[in-house]
Amino acid sequence: MLYYLFEYLEKEFQLPGAGLFQFISFRASIAIIFSLLVSLIFGKRIIELLNRFQMGESIRDLGLAGQKEKAGTPTMGGLIIILATLTPVLLFAKLDNIYILLLIITTLWMGSIGFIDDYIKIKRKNKEGLKGRFKIIGQIGLGLIVGIILYFHPDVTIRENATIGQEVVINEKSTKTTIPLLKNNEFNYADVITWIDESWSAYAWLVFIPFVIFIVTAVSNGANLTDGIDGLAAGTATLIVLVLGAFAWVSGNIIFSDYLNVMYIPDVSELVIFIAAFAGGLVGFLWYNTYPAQVFMGDTGSLTIGGIIAVVALSVRKELLIPVLCGVFLIESLSVILQVGYFKYTKKKTGVGKRIFLMAPVHHHFQKQGHHESKIVTRFWIITIALAIISLVTLKIR
């Protein structure tokens, strides 16, 4: 909103300083500061409201150290992240940008699913929360919306060989994405079916949209599983989105994309504003979520975090980098899949179910081994930093 106001003031009255709002770096800086302030100032009030309405977490006895002390800690803290993200976005971003609109939809959609889940857990005393099939339906629904918009919307385009000082290349609709660490690092989803017949390229959405649904569902569930100890999900997500912000900046800047020889995606640099606000909200939430936590993000926060990361990665055409960049989410998810799968297999074969880990997700395995949760969180952050560096290196190494 303020973007359009200052754009008008600059155009009509040449107001000193109004032109700064044309620069993404300036708006991103304001967005991250504003979101940090919103989360710090209003976060405490939201926590007080959650306590007043008795939105405290009921803790199952899993035999983990320090677990009983957390009983009654308010959950639904994801509301702090959502408020701190959307407020600066509405103020400083271009609201007619398709990528911004898509992320606003994602935030509200996944936040609503998570809120319903948390509400059922707390108010109805049902620890299972929203039934799994309804969560999956919600995630598939969002994936379907995202896939349809990214495939069919006329503003979602790329420009190949976008060089400075030469003839203008027309933006084109494409299902191309990038493969990390490969020299010829582009992959077109249409190639999955066009090898049969070139005319089938019009049906590339049959490949692209299901893959988008898979990415949205997998990443949001991975973030949800990672949210098990104080500060883990929020800290990990902050590092991930900052890297995605760098990708959005480079891919949306014709000079940087030409220098680094990466795909130029028109208008995608506006995502930097959203990412800056999101990162500020996550850091502000960490103020209250670090050990010992004053508030938990709940599914309201974790599902929203996963959904946003997935949609940003898809928008900047870096979804195939997710297994590296979101390696912690992947490890957490695999630990649960392997644990459940091996237990069922051994029970069927021998009649007695066996486990690979002491407990899943894997962060609880380390808790069972006697490691303090602060040490576990810090080490997972270090792993994420290493994976983030590897991800950034893919801009130049291939």
Image: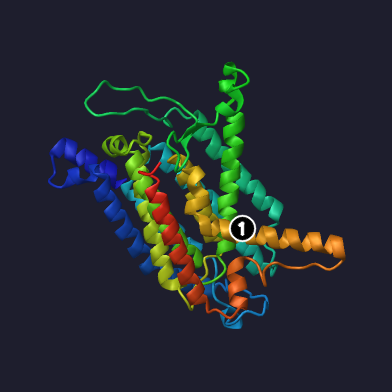
Residue at left offset 24%, top offset 50%:
26
**Coordinates of residue 112 in the picture (x, y in percent):** 56, 54
Q: At which x and y percent is residue 230? A: 51, 72
Q: Is residue 325 above or below residue 56?
A: above
Q: Mark 1 points at which residue?
A: 333
> Looking at the image, is 150 positioned above or below residue 140?
above
Q: Say what secondary structure mark 1 lies in.
A: helix
Q: Position of residue 44 (x, y in %)?
A: 42, 72
**Image quadrant where residue 72 sits:** bottom right
Residue 217 visible in the current orientation: yes
Left or right for 40, reference 176: left
Which residue occupies the foreground of this view, 50 or 345? Answer: 345
Q: Which of 297 and 233 is in front in this view?
A: 233
Visible in this render: residue 294? no
Q: In which quarter of the image is the N terminus?
A: top left
Task: Report the side of 360 relative to 36 (left or right).
Answer: right
